């Protein structure tokens, strides 16, 4: 019988589940989401494969849980780090920045490759898990359009274009061909200009972004 390190079985299970997801986070930084195996995760978490399967029956369910955790973290960070009076342009720039940081921290293959790896049902479930981030982007674009900050383009279509531009930075970031800061300037400035934001405001939004937390300091 496994050793219980918490006051109750429920607390022990919660701790173990959190340790498993932390192991996934660690492994995705070095191997990418598509490269990890259940054996890798069990070893990193310090448990047996049998124990791991008691929490997650397969890799798809494990990745879904991890994606849900990352999504909640993204939405919470967005709410906490942006002032309530931030403009739509500032919020859009921050959204792009946080997305790029997520790609760099947890590398993953392109959508088509991930879909082929997980299968259609699991991939659809994965898409449902990241929907809150997409709704957040649509809200930013809607607010900017209604407030006169952005040109009047269809927000759903514009959101897909913005996400596509963010996704296009995946390979350069993973290969260290660009930095988060460089990718942020490129995508944010291009997007804000395309939406009709005045150039001085574009420059303020881009320059106000926090420096890379993933880049080493001298």
Image (cartoon, grey):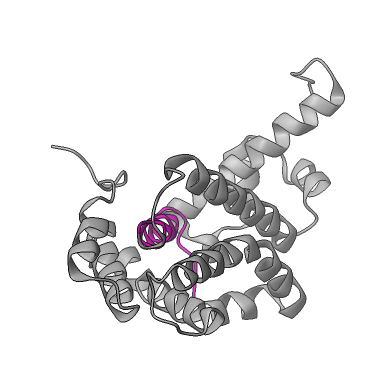
The answer to which of 167 and 133 lies nearer the viewer is 133
Q: Which residues are magenta?
A: 90-110
Q: Nearer the viewer, residue 74 or 4?
A: 74
Q: Is residue 108 above or below residue 3?
A: below
Residue drawn at x 31%, y 81% is 194
Figure quadrant of the C terminus: top left
Q: In the drawing, does residue 176 fall left or right of residue 129?
A: left
Residue nearer the viewer, 169 or 84: 84
User: What is the magenta segment's predominant secondary structure?
Assistant: helix
Is residue 13 shown above or below 137? above
Furthest residue in direction left, as rendered: 218
Between 67 and 94, the residue placed more toward the observer is 94
In this view of the protein, can residue 2 be seen by the observer?
A: no
Residue 108 located within the stretch drawn in magenta: yes
Q: Name the spot of residue 179 as percent of width and height, x first.
A: 24, 60
Percent across and percent down for residue 178 are: 23, 65
Q: Position of residue 207 (x, y in %)?
A: 20, 54
């Amino acid at each position: 019988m496994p050793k219980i390190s918490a006051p109750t079985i429920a607390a022990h299970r919660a701790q173990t589940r959190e340790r498993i997801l932390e192991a996934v986070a660690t492994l995705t930084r070095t191997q990418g989401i598509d490269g990890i195996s259940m054996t890798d995760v069990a070893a990193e978490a310090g448990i047996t494969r049998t124990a791991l399967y008691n929490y997650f029956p397969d890799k798809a369910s494990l990745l879904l849980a991890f994606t849900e955790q990352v999504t909640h973290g993204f939405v919470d960070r967005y709410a906490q780090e942006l002032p309530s009076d931030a403009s739509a342009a500032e919020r859009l720039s921050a959204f792009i920045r946080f997305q790029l940081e997520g790609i760099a921290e947890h590398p993953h293959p392109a959508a088509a490759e991930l879909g082929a790896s997980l299968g259609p049902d699991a991939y659809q479930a994965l898409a449902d898990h990241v929907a809150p981030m997409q709704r957040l982007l649509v809200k930013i674009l809607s607010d900017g359009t209604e407030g006169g900050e952005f040109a009047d383009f269809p927000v759903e279509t514009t959101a897909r274009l913005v996400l596509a531009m963010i996704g296009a930075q995946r390979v350069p970031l993973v290969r260290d061909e660009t930095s988060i800061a460089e990718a942020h300037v490129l995508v944010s400035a291009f997007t804000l200009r395309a939406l009709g934001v005045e150039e001085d405001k574009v420059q303020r939004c881009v320059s106000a972004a926090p420096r890379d937390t993933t880049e080493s300091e001298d």
